[in-house]
Amino acid sequence: MTIETTLIKDLVIIQPTVFEDSRGYFFEAYNQEKFCGNGINYKFIQDNQSFSTRGVIRGLHLQISPFAQAKLVRVLEGEILDVAVDLRKDSSTFGQYFSVVLSSENKKQLMVPHGFAHGFSVLSETASVLYKVDQLYHKESERGIRYDDPTLSIDWQLSPEEIIVSDKDLILPSFMVIDG
């Protein structure tokens, strides 16, 4: 397992060691000892899974403290563009986003710590996404940022006519509201 740092502090990509042979493959998707040995110290308490079709954008979602969620995101089937936005006001990368393609082929995972908004777009025909969280869902702490916020200007790698967003996500506020 290798841990790849990104330009945003504490946001890391995890690449598992994959053992392949004529039968298929095997890898450790999560190993608490190895994660902790690399400074990733979360106690995951729930797994969430979603299935979406091409063009779906889910997010940008977050929960505020004390119910903020860290997420370990991976793709079981298909391909997504995974996006995390730094909302930590004391961070030198506040308001910046990072994106990475996660797929069932590359088996990469994104570790999204507390203080980030998170979302993804589906680039394949379908995608199944699994993510671990370290806090339970808490409706009153739920927040979000509109996916097409002009301040963030995220390239979701989809054409405008193929984007599918839930009614709930379409009414999310802009980054400037979250920032202010």
Image (cartoon, rainbow, N blue to C red):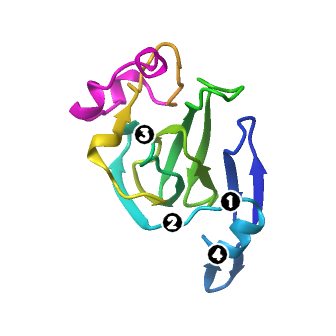
Image-quadrant location for residue 109: bottom right
Precedes in sequence: disc 2 or disc 4: 4
How far from the left and from the top, in percent, is residue 144? 38, 32
Q: CA distance from mark 2 to mark 1?
A: 11 Å
Q: CA distance from mark 1 to mark 3?
A: 20 Å
> Neighbour class for label 4 at 10 Å: few (<14), some, many (≥20)?
few
Q: Is residue 17 visible?
A: no
User: Is residue 178 inside the magenta stretch?
Assistant: yes
Image-quadrant location for residue 22: bottom right
Please give the residue where the numbered disc 1 appears in the rendered image.
40
The residue positioned 44% from the left and 47% from the top of the image is 66
Q: CA distance from mark 2 to mark 4?
A: 16 Å
Precedes in sequence: disc 1 or disc 4: 4
Precedes in sequence: disc 4 or disc 3: 4
Where does the magenta region start and end?
158-180
Numbered circle sitting on residue 122: none
Q: CA distance from mark 1 to mark 4?
A: 15 Å
Question: Helix, strand or loop at disc 1?
Answer: loop
* 110 to the left or right of 149: right
Q: Kindly identify the amino acid type of the residue bearing the numbered disc 3.
A: Ile
Q: Kindly identify the amino acid type of the residue bearing the numbered disc 2.
A: Phe
